[in-house]
Amino acid sequence: MLSNRNINEYNGVFIAVVIEKNLMPRYTYGNKNKGNKTLNTIIKLPADTNGNPD
């Protein structure tokens, strides 16, 4: 688990929802989420033109 002191409650909830929405369609009951499969998943978050979080 990664941690960041700059993440507040609202940022954490936003990131949790983005992760959930990205993983749910991929991993159903028949296609379970196992080990490294999730670690290798890339989840894109919104960013400005400089690559900073938006």
Image: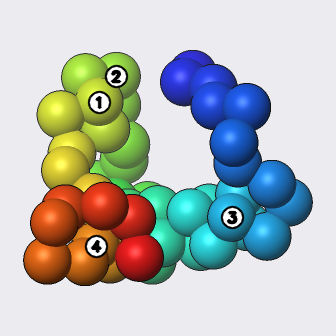
- In this rendering, the answer to whether 15 lies above or below 42 is below
| Count of labels in the image | 4
Colour logic: rainbow
In this rendering, position of residue 31 left or right of residue 15: left
- Cα distance in 3D space between marks 1 and 3: 21 Å
Reading the image, the residue beneath label 3 is: 11
Q: Where is residue 21 in the image (x, y as percent from the top left)?
A: 45, 77
- Which badge, 3 or 4, is on the more N-terminal residue? 3
Check if mark 2's residue and mark 1's residue have beta carbons within 8 Å.
yes
Check if mark 2's residue and mark 3's residue have beta carbons within 8 Å.
no
- Which badge, 4 or 2, is on the more N-terminal residue? 2
Element carrying mark 1: helix
The part of the image, by quadrant, that contains residue 10 is: bottom right
Q: How crowded is mark 4: few (under 14 residues within 10 Å), some or many (20 or more)?
A: few
Element carrying mark 4: loop
In this rendering, position of residue 49 left or right of residue 48: left
In this rendering, position of residue 40 left or right of residue 38: left
The part of the image, by quadrant, that contains residue 12 is: bottom right
The quarter in which the C terminus is drawn is bottom left
Reading the image, the residue beneath label 2 is: 35
Residue drawn at x 62%, y 61% as measured from the top left: 16
- Cα distance in 3D space between marks 2 and 3: 26 Å
- Cα distance in 3D space between marks 4 and 1: 21 Å
Residue drawn at x 63%, y 31% as measured from the top left: 4
Reading the image, the residue beneath label 1 is: 39
Element carrying mark 2: loop
Q: Position of residue 18 (x, y in %)?
A: 48, 72
The part of the image, by quadrant, that contains residue 52 is: bottom left
Reading the image, the residue beneath label 4 is: 47
- Which badge, 4 or 1, is on the more N-terminal residue? 1
- The amino acid beneath tag 3 is Asn
